[in-house]
């Protein structure tokens, strides 16, 4: 891959304190992801896929090693600066979507823009564009609690993309979805809106790995 | 860092949205806080209560109860705090939003509680109740609201110092 990596992990070690019994997820992980690349992280449940995304997003910190995102060392960035860094550069689709059920679809997608301090008119325009791009504009005024799993995933994608981030992290995006919705989602990941974006997606299914440009496999560490 | 006034507009927006984001928590808050305020107003409504020594410990109990309830309420919103952080909100914005939400919640609940308390004591004391449950009672209620909201906001401020993953694992 040409050019500088946008995401770089150097000798990363991550250990969870499993109630006094430390459980090692990564001992010495090295990874480079390049601009515009679609990388799939494939592996069984519990192998550390979500942990890896959490580390890249700065949601979690490694015990050892360095993590760079767009040249900034997120593994040592203070929490106060991480929020604005994430806002500007990262979009995240959580495995469980993490949408707020009592808010409407529009309000959920609007949230990252509110935190960016954008004005109401610009927020409205950008939310409408994002909802349209992921085929959920008809549901804008509906509460998230009334949507199906597939619709929620599309809303979650719209929320991740509404700030136009350069890097998008997707945690098991095809989980719990029917075949038709998976097709829709995968085509949107390969669509115009994602052109030039760096996508890092985790999966334990083969479908997503077939559309990704590169696949890395994580193995589950036996206790 | 932006604390506390940099993103004031965002905090106000979020603080008001909290009433919908956590509607169940709001209902629980209104119920418990108004009950505490109603009980306090009922006791202070008895003639001469404000001037007696009993007023001081009862006021302390009132303030502590408000703080405990509000502290409990914000524990319920810790998952939302992690989500807002993940979506790019800074600590100051979240803390200020919680402070605003708790203050409004506390004031509305107190107004309701004081009205209910007066409603119960009025048949027993008549118009004398307004001589007893006066400025001092309202001051204690107001102080309790502000103390409770501050304690709740401080808890969120401290909690939001942790990483998103830590908060989420703590919140279950």
Image (cartoon, coloured by chain):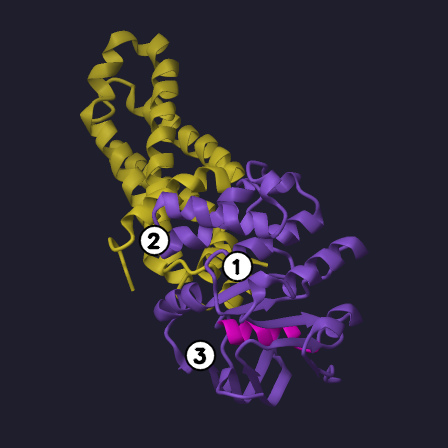
Chain colours: A purple, B yellow
**Counting residues from the N terminus, which is met first, the one under dot 1 or under dot 2?**
2
- Give A121 or A43, whichever is nearer the viewer: A121
SS assignment at label 2: loop
Residue B31, given in percent of the width and then of the height, sits at 47, 30
Q: How far is the residue under mark 2 from the one under mark 3? A: 23 Å
Q: For the point 52% across and 43% down, which residue is it?
A: A106
The furthest residue to the front:
A192
Q: How far is the residue under mark 1 from the one under mark 2? A: 16 Å
Q: How far is the residue under mark 3 from the one under mark 1? A: 18 Å
- The N terminus of chain A: image quadrant: bottom right
**Counting residues from the N terminus, which is met first, the one under dot 2 or under dot 3?**
3
Determine the image quadrant of residue B58: top left
Q: Which residues are magenta?
A: A47-57
State the residue position of label 1.
A161
B3 vs A51, left or right, is: left
**Counting residues from the N terminus, which is met first, the one under dot 3 or under dot 1?**
3
Determine the image quadrant of residue B57: top left
Using the image, determine if residue B135 lies above or below residue B130: below
State the residue position of label 3.
A70
**Which mark's residue is nearer the viewer, 1 or 2?**
1
Residues at discs 3 and 1 in contact (Cβ within 8 Å): no
SS assignment at label 1: helix
State the residue position of label 2.
A117
- Give B135 or A198, whichever is nearer the viewer: A198
Q: For the point 61% across and 39% down, which residue is it?
A: A138
């Amino acid at each position: 891959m040409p050019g500088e990596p946008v995401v770089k992990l150097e000798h990363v070690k991550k250990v969870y304190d499993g109630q006094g019994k430390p459980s090692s997820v990564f001992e010495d992980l090295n990874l480079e992801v390049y601009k515009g690349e679609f990388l799939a992280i494939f592996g069984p449940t519990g192998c550390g896929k979500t942990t890896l995304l959490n580390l890249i997003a700065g949601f979690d910190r490694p015990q050892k090693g360095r993590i760079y995102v767009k040249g900034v060392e997120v593994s040592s960035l203070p929490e106060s600066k991480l929020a604005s860094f994430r806002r500007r550069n990262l979009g995240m689709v959580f495995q469980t979507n993490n949408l707020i059920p009592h808010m409407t679809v529009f309000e959920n997608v609007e949230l990252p823009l509110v935190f960016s301090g954008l004005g109401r008119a610009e927020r409205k325009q950008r939310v409408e564009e994002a909802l349209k791009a992921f085929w959920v504009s008809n549901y804008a005024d509906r509460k998230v609690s009334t949507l199906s799993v597939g619709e929620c995933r599309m809303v979650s994608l719209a929320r991740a993309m509404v700030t136009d981030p350069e890097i998008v992290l997707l945690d098991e995006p095809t989980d719990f979805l029917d075949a038709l919705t998976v097709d829709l989602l995968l085509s949107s990941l390969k669509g115009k809106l994602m052109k030039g974006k760096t996508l890092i997606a985790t999966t334990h299914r083969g479908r997503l790995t077939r559309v990704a440009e590169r696949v890395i496999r994580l193995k589950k560490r036996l206790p | 860092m932006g604390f506390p006034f940099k993103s004031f507009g965002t905090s106000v927006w979020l603080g008001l949205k909290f009433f919908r984001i956590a509607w169940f928590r709001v209902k629980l808050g209104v119920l418990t806080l108004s009950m505490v305020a109603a009980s306090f107003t009922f006791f202070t409504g008895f003639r001469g209560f404000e001037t007696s020594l009993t007023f001081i410990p009862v006021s302390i109990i009132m303030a502590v109860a408000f703080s405990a309830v509000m502290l409990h309420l914000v524990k319920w919103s810790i998952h939302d705090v992690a989500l807002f952080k993940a979506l790019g909100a800074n600590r100051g914005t979240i803390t200020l939003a919680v402070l605003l939400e708790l203050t409004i919640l506390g004031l509305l609940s107190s107004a309701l509680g004081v009205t209910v308390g007066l409603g119960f004591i009025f048949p027993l004391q008549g118009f004398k109740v307004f001589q007893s449950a006066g400025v001092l009672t309202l001051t204690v209620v107001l102080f309790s609201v502000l103390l409770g909201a501050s304690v709740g906001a401080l808890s969120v401020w401290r909690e939001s110092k942790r990483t998103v993953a830590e908060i989420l694992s703590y919140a279950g």
